[in-house]
């Protein structure tokens, strides 16, 4: 019997299963164009199920594998319907993961080659969908106050029908290689409400309002036609809704353009992998001729192997995303600036961000995105106790779950345990090294005070500042600091690429002996880089780096510098009284040490006859601690000290001026307290006098 896939495979020298997979991915494009023209009702469910059956049974001939998928789907549906306990989503998670593990073990025992496509790939995608569905239903049974915004947006208050659930699980553009998505998103696509997402521009806002008004009107008509109300959107309402959407423009613009761009990018990476992939493989490192080359060539060869391995994933994910966009599922509202449609709701990979990632957080956020979302929503956040933040333990559980989801071979666990360690190392550098290069440089020993938020008030006629400051610009990061930041980003990118291409070998070689042989032949350079990174943090490298280049420093040192700059900015106070007795302790210490420069410049003030001192009983209840109560004799005896005279006169004038001076002094005290200064005992005296 003539098999066209075998003929193409022999002509191109490509495994026949790869040809079948590419055919299914490309066939999804015209089938997706037909999908959007179907009525927005149950017809779309049956269409998707039929196309998925054609791919699995007619093309790939995975008869037993398709039965495995149906078993997982039906088992999950029964658990969700008949188990209403809080453990239900975890039971579903254990059920589908256990079933997947059996398939992985079967593949390992029989040593099925990676070039052979069998059901575990589709089963991995289905595990994500089913576990997400179970958690969404469980969230629908919880109090809304216990849910975060993402959980609240995807919660399901009732279990859908079996045909809707089958259409969701067997959605044909993502049945083979993903990505996964929530049932709420699929349901909004089927019933035509996905394109009613809130737009950003005024014209789009009017269009949205018109669409929703038409939908509401049609729902009211349907309620009048059917006595007893409508539990879900019926067929007539769906058709009218579809007509209302089409009346104001139909599907959002840009769908075809973006979809075919993704297809072109996918075909480009597919051709790149077909031409250059066989020339750079990790198995080449295991050959006996490996030691015939120099170390520089060997290092570059490992990097080429990593890049070529990623092109295969780029190709299939880009092709799949194009088909999903073409059927409308990728619609993600409108851009708030340009007003153009966005089609990245089901995006699975950002090639540019991956290849230019400066740390592992950026890398993991842009690689296999929908799987990362699944791990975050179903594992990372769920294993964290309520009221606590996720930490290293949650990260390691997440990475181990990802390894368990991928398979049972040791290479997966080696790769993902290293991934958890690298994520922890990236957090340490982001917390301790990166702030050194983002803080302002160390200030000049005697900078002029500046204010970036407001202009100082004009001096009052009764008090003129003795030495007004010279205005200067706010200090900017130095050239050295900018160069260090660029160097930090470059070294971060180099570290990510070197370690990623080193660890990806275990993800593809899989068996333990091959992985260890690869590490030995590359001199364990990836593990050495990781140990050097942790050693740099452990030996207080960030602190020494900040001291050497005059940037950043520890958190305590950085706080001291901020306080120092705040004190210098307060050195000129143009308001009459200058804070009064707020420098009681500071003035006393300055007089004792022989210095004549107080914290704030005090204007020249003529001492007026003071009023009689307040009763001791009143002040004793207001002023805490062993504070000396100012009397007329004390003020006259301390008039020889400039700082003490200014302090006493500030207190007296606060009493004489009344509420205006009181509020002025209080605002100065508040400003000083906000920048971290200590409130002296003289402040307590002044506030007590003002209160009286």
Image (cartoon, rainbow, N blue to C red):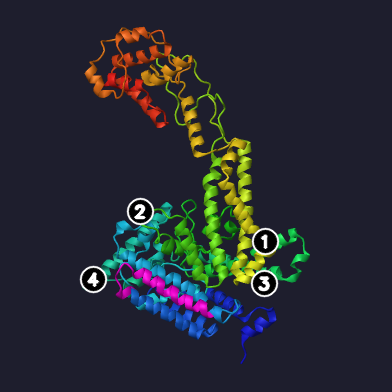
Question: What residue is rendered at 61% in x and 46% in y?
Answer: 488
Question: What residue is rendered at 35% in x and 13% in y?
Answer: 648
Question: What residue is rendered at 23% in x and 71% in y?
Answer: 229
Q: CA distance from mark 3 to mark 2?
A: 50 Å
Q: Which mark is residue 229?
A: 4
- C-beta proximity under 8 Å, tags 4 and 2: no
Q: CA distance from mark 3 to mark 4?
A: 58 Å
- Classify 628 as above or below 291: above
Q: Which residues are magenta?
A: 80-106
Looking at the image, tell me whether mark 3 or mark 1 is earlier in sequence order: 3
Using a 10 Å C-alpha cutoff, classify the residue at mark 4 as few (fewer than 14 neighbours), some (14 to 19) or many (20 or more). few
The nearer-to-camera label among 3 and 4 is 3
Quadrant (top left/top right/bottom left/bottom right) for the C terminus:
top left
Please name the residue that numbered disc 3 is placed on: 274
Looking at the image, tell me whether mark 3 or mark 4 is earlier in sequence order: 4
- C-beta proximity under 8 Å, tags 3 and 4: no
Please name the residue that numbered disc 2 is placed on: 387
Q: Helix, strand, or loop for circle 1?
A: helix
- Classify 177 as above or below 546: below
Looking at the image, tell me whether mark 4 or mark 2 is earlier in sequence order: 4
The nearer-to-camera label among 1 and 2 is 2
Q: Position of residue 365 (x, y in %)?
A: 52, 58
Q: Is residue 189 visible?
A: no
Q: CA distance from mark 4 to mark 2?
A: 41 Å
Q: Helix, strand, or loop for circle 4?
A: loop
Judge left or right: residue 169 versus residue 7.
left
Camera-side residue of 482 and 270: 482
Please name the residue that numbered disc 1 is placed on: 303
Q: Position of residue 232 (x, y in %)?
A: 30, 71
């Amino acid at each position: 019997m003539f098999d066209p896939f075998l003929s193409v495979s022999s002509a191109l020298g490509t495994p026949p299963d790869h040809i079948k997979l590419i055919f299914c991915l490309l066939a999804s494009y015209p089938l997706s164009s037909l999908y959007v023209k179907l009525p927005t009702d149950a017809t779309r469910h049956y269409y998707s199920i039929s196309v998925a059956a054609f791919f699995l049974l007619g093309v790939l001939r995975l008869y037993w594998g398709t039965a495995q998928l149906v078993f997982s789907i039906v088992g999950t549906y029964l658990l969700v319907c008949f188990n209403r306990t809080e453990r239900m989503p975890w039971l579903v998670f254990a059920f589908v993961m256990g079933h997947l593990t059996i398939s992985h073990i079967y593949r390992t025992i029989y040593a099925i080659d990676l070039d052979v496509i069998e059901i575990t790939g589709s089963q991995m995608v289905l595990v994500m969908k089913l576990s997400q569905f179970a958690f969404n239903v469980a969230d629908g049974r919880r109090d809304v106050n216990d849910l975060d915004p993402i959980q609240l947006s995807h919660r399901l208050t009732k279990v859908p029908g079996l045909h809707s659930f089958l259409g969701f699980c067997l959605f044909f553009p993502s049945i083979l290689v993903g990505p996964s998505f929530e049932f709420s998103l699929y349901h909004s696509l089927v019933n035509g409400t996905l394109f009613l997402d809130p737009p950003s521009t005024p014209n789009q806002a009017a269009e949205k309002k018109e669409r929703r008004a038409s939908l509401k009107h049609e729902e009211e008509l349907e309620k009048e036609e059917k006595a007893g109300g409508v539990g879900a959107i019926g067929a007539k309402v769906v058709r009218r809704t579809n007509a209302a959407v089409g009346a104001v423009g139909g599907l959002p613009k840009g769908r075809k353009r973006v979809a075919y761009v993704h297809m072109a990018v996918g075909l480009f990476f597919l051709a790149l992998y077909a031409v250059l992939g066989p020339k750079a493989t990790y198995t080449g490192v295991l050959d006996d001729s490996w030691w015939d080359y120099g170390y520089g060539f060997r290092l570059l060869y490992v990097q080429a192997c990593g890049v070529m391995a990623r092109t295969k994933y780029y190709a299939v994910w880009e092709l799949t995303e194009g088909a999903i966009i073409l059927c409308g599922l990728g619609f993600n509202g409108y851009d708030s600036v340009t007003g153009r449609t966005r089609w990245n709701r089901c995006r699975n990979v950002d090639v540019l961000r991956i290849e230019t990632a400066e740390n592992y957080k950026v890398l993991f956020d842009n690689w296999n995105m929908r799987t990362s979302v699944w791990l975050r929503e179903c594992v990372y956040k769920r294993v964290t106790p309520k009221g606590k933040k996720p930490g290293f333990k949650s990260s390691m559980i997440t990475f181990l779950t990802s390894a368990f989801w991928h398979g049972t071979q040791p290479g997966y666990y080696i790769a993902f345990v290293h991934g958890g360690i690298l994520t922890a190392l990236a957090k340490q550098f982001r917390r301790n090294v990166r702030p050194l290069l983002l803080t302002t440089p160390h200030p000049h020993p005697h900078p002029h005070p500046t204010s970036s938020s407001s202009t100082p008030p004009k001096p009052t006629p009764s008090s003129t500042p003795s030495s007004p400051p010279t205005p200067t610009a706010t200090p900017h990061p130095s050239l050295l600091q900018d160069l260090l930041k660029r160097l930090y980003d470059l070294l971060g990118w180099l570290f990510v690429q070197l370690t990623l291409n080193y660890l990806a070998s275990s993800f593809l070689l899989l068996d333990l002996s091959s992985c260890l042989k690869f590490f030995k032949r590359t001199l364990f350079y990836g593990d050495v880089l990781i140990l050097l990174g942790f050693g740099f943090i452990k030996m207080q490298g960030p602190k020494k780096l900040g001291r050497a280049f005059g940037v950043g420093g520890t958190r305590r040192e950085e706080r001291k510098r901020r306080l120092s700059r705040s004190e210098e900015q307060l050195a000129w106070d143009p308001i009459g009284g200058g804070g009064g007795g707020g420098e009681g302790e500071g003035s006393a210490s300055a007089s004792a040490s022989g210095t004549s420069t107080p914290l704030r410049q005090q204007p020249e003030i003529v001492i007026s006859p003071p009023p009689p001192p307040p009763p001791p009983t009143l002040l004793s209840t207001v002023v805490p601690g062993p504070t000396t109560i100012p009397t007329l004799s004390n003020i006259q005896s301390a008039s020889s000290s400039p700082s003490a005279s200014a302090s006493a006169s500030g207190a007296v004038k606060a009493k004489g001026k009344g509420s205006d001076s009181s509020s002025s002094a209080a605002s100065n005290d508040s400003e000083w307290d906000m920048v971290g200064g200590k409130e002296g005992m003289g402040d307590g005296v002044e506030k007590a006098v003002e209160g009286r």
